């Protein structure tokens, strides 16, 4: 019997919310209150990649500007650009544009109609997703699922915590979010839309799912190399620190597992973290859930995703360990990102031969951007 597979991401402007911007009215509550969408930064006219970078602590910026893309990649592999992946930030002001590019990259590298299994490309959107982005995703053949009616927990982004918190004693170790909220403590998430990721576990029409964040870039066949060969549940992990990166995951949808996740999230039955700079996102939640083995059901054992399938700083891009998915776009791939954006606007991502043959040598105009 043919199994149905899916490559899924989220595409919302409800992202990178600061403590001052937070609002308890999100999702269905925001719609009921007549709230306007969270406004992300505009796309602007010149969406070309830049040479700004994070993590570059060895190479002078003047030298960075003079290096061709392949030379940048070689410098990174030699360890000359620091520990963090040097990132092209040309798209980082607008997450829905990044989402469009990421979805296009996944579609472009997925094998064509002759493959043995059916593969859908799915994007979760909400009341904050610009309509023109939804229209472009639909034109590309992406299955769009509207998450606008999601009911966020009552404690979510609680804005009335300051006075109550001042009069409550210090919280005991192991205090849950729900218990802290009952004592008047605030809950903050700078990434409200990241919690949509839980719904990937409820897409039970699919046998297996590859989830990817909006800031990922695929340069290899994600179905052949990742989705088909990786057991569920799998994510980049470090057992000693109990770290889990949820930016790329392979999972098996199951209604019972989703109901368990939903209950824990709605009740705030997970450890409380007070953080006004970044807050609590799905990753912190899932780290607790999977390392504490709180789920019962198929696909809930924790497996390690290969570093080359979620490459942030592992230098997987050497010839012997070919990277499949970058988590953030490295400087030397910025030209590819621009080409993907142009293809997405033109509605030509799947089986785009020109993108699949992408080589910097054939695009000399991008060497000096």
Image (cartoon, helix red, strand yellow):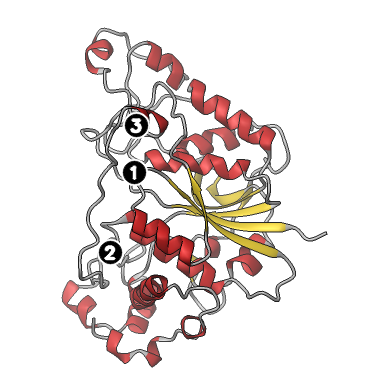
Image coordinates of residue 248 in percent, x first then y, are 52, 54
Residue at 70% x, 57% y: name it: 4
The secondary structure type at the circle numbered 2 is: loop
Q: Is residue 115 visible?
A: yes
Seen in the image, is 60 located left or right of residue 8? left
Q: Residue furthest left?
A: 62
Nearest to the eye among marks 2 and 3: give it: 3
Q: Which residue is label 3 attached to?
A: 30
Q: Mark 1: few, some, or many residues within 10 Å (few <14, many ≥20)? A: many
Q: Residue furthest right?
A: 1
Seen in the image, is 141 located left or right of residue 184? right
From what the image shows, is residue 261 above or below residue 161? below
**Marks 2 and 1, the one that precedes in the sequence:** 1
Q: Are marks 2 and 3 in contact (CB under 8 Å)?
A: no
Q: Are marks 3 and 1 in contact (CB under 8 Å)?
A: no
Q: Which residue is label 1 attached to?
A: 14
Nearest to the eye among marks 3 and 1: give it: 3
Query: Which residue occupies the foreground of this view, 103 or 34?
Result: 34
Q: Mark 3: few, some, or many residues within 10 Å (few <14, many ≥20)? A: some
Which quadrant of the structure image shows residue 327? bottom left
Seen in the image, is 65 located left or right of residue 230? left
* Spatial CA span between label 3 and label 1: 12 Å
Which quadrant of the structure image shows residue 126? top left
Residue at 36% x, 33% y: name it: 31
Query: Which residue occupies the foreground of this view, 363 or 83?
Result: 363
Which quadrant of the structure image shows residue 15? top left
Nearest to the eye among marks 2 and 1: give it: 1
Q: Which residue is label 2 attached to?
A: 89
* Spatial CA span between label 2 and label 1: 19 Å
């Amino acid at each position: 019997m043919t199994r149905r597979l899916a490559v899924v991401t989220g595409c919302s402007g409800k992202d990178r919310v600061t403590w001052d911007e937070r609002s308890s009215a999100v999702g269905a509550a925001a719609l009921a209150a007549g709230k306007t969408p969270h406004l992300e930064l505009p796309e602007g006219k010149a969406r070309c990649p830049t040479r700004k970078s994070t993590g570059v602590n060895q190479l002078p910026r003047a030298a960075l500007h003079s290096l061709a893309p392949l030379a940048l990649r070689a410098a990174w592999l030699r360890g000359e650009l620091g520990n963090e992946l040097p990132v092209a930030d040309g798209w980082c002001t607008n997450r829905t544009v990044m989402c469009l590019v990421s979805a296009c990259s996944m579609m472009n590298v997925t094998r064509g109609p002759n493959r043995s299994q059916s593969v859908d490309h799915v994007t979760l959107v909400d009341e904050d997703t610009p309509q023109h982005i939804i229209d472009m995703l639909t034109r590309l053949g992406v299955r769009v699922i509207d998450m606008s009616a999601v009911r966020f927990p009552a404690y979510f982004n609680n804005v009335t915590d300051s006075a109550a918190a001042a009069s409550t004693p210090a919280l005991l170790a192991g205090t849950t979010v729900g218990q802290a909220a009952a004592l008047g403590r605030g809950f903050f998430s700078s990434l409200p839309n990241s919690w949509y990721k839980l719904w990937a576990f409820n897409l039970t029409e699919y046998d297996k799912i590859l989830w990817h964040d909006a800031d990922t870039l695929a340069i290899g066949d994600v179905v052949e190399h990742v989705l088909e060969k990786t057991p569920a549940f799998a994510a980049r992990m470090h057992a000693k620190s109990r770290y889990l990166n949820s930016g790329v995951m392979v999972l098996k949808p199951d209604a019972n597992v989703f109901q368990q996740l939903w209950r824990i999230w709605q009740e705030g039955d997970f450890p409380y973290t007070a953080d006004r700079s970044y807050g609590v996102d799905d990753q912190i939640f899932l780290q607790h859930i999977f390392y504490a083995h709180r789920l019962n059901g198929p696909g809930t054992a924790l497996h390690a995703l290969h570093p080359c399938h979620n490459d942030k700083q592992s230098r997987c891009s050497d010839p012997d360990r070919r990277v499949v998915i970058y988590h953030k776009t490295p400087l030397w791939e910025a030209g590819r990102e621009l080409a993907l954006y142009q293809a997405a606007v033109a509605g030509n991502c799947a089986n785009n031969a020109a993108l699949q043959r992408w080589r910097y040598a054939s695009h000399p105009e991008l060497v000096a951007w």
